[in-house]
Image: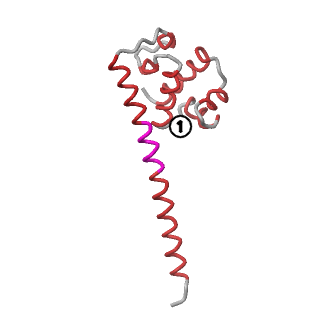
């Protein structure tokens, strides 16, 4: 499945199951409507977006993993969400993975900021007459 198909599927879920606007769902996902819209349109998105969306659906007792089922039918998500122990463990691991991805992203941003600062300092040193 590509991002265009994923976007089509989450649009169906948003409209037919959640009955929300893009703005409303984006607010629940703690992101801007523009970011959500790009993902739904198949022109944006990230693993963090996918994890956030799956966690949101799971928290509402929807069978989020069925977004990836072939053939897809939005009705599959509405079926009773009785999770087996392996399913529960999988969602725990998914949540942990999302937290680690967020922490790694934050560390990367800090590292890039440090590198940019060092580059600016070196540039300033080069501009100073010897």
> Residue 118: x, y in percent?
48, 69
Say which residue label 1 marks: 44
101 magenta-colored: yes
**Residue at 49 percent of width and 14 percent of height:** 77
**Residue at 48 percent of width and 63 percent of height:** 114
Write down the quadrant of residue 20 in the picture.
top right
> Residue 70: x, y in percent?
40, 16
> Residue 126: x, y in percent?
51, 81
Q: Which residues are magenta?
A: 98-106
Residue 87 higher or lower than 126, as above or below: above
**Residue at 37 percent of width and 31 percent of height:** 93
Write down the quadrant of residue 27 in the picture.
top right
In this view of the protein, which residue sits in the foreground, 16 or 3?
A: 16
7 left or right of 20 in image: left
16 left or right of 90 in image: right
Q: Secondary structure at mark 1?
A: loop
Residue 54 higher or lower than 108, as above or below: above
Query: Where, quadrant-wise, is the N terminus in this rendering?
Result: top left
Residue 23 higher or lower than 72, as above or below: below
Label 1 crowding class (10 Å Cα cut-off): few <14, some 14-19, many 20+? some
Q: Residue furthest bottom?
A: 130
**Residue at 48 percent of width and 56 percent of height:** 110
Residue 6 higher or lower than 34, as above or below: above
Display coloring: secondary structure
Q: Main secondary structure of the magenta part?
A: helix
In this view of the protein, which residue sits in the foreground, 129 or 71?
A: 129
90 magenta-colored: no
């Amino acid at each position: 499945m590509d991002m265009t198909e994923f976007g089509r599927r989450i649009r169906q879920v948003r409209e037919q199951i959640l009955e929300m606007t893009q703005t409303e769902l984006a607010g629940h996902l703690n992101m801007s409507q523009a970011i959500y819209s790009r993902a739904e349109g198949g022109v944006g998105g990230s693993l963090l977006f996918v994890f956030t969306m799956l966690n949101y659906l799971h928290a509402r007792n929807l069978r989020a993993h069925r977004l990836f089922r072939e053939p897809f039918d939005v009705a599959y998500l509405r079926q009773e969400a009785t999770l087996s122990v392996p399913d529960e463990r999988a969602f725990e691991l998914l949540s942990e993975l999302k937290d680690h991805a967020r922490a790694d992203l934050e560390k990367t941003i800090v590292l890039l900021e440090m590198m940019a600062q060092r580059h600016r300092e070196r540039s300033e040193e080069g501009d100073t007459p010897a």
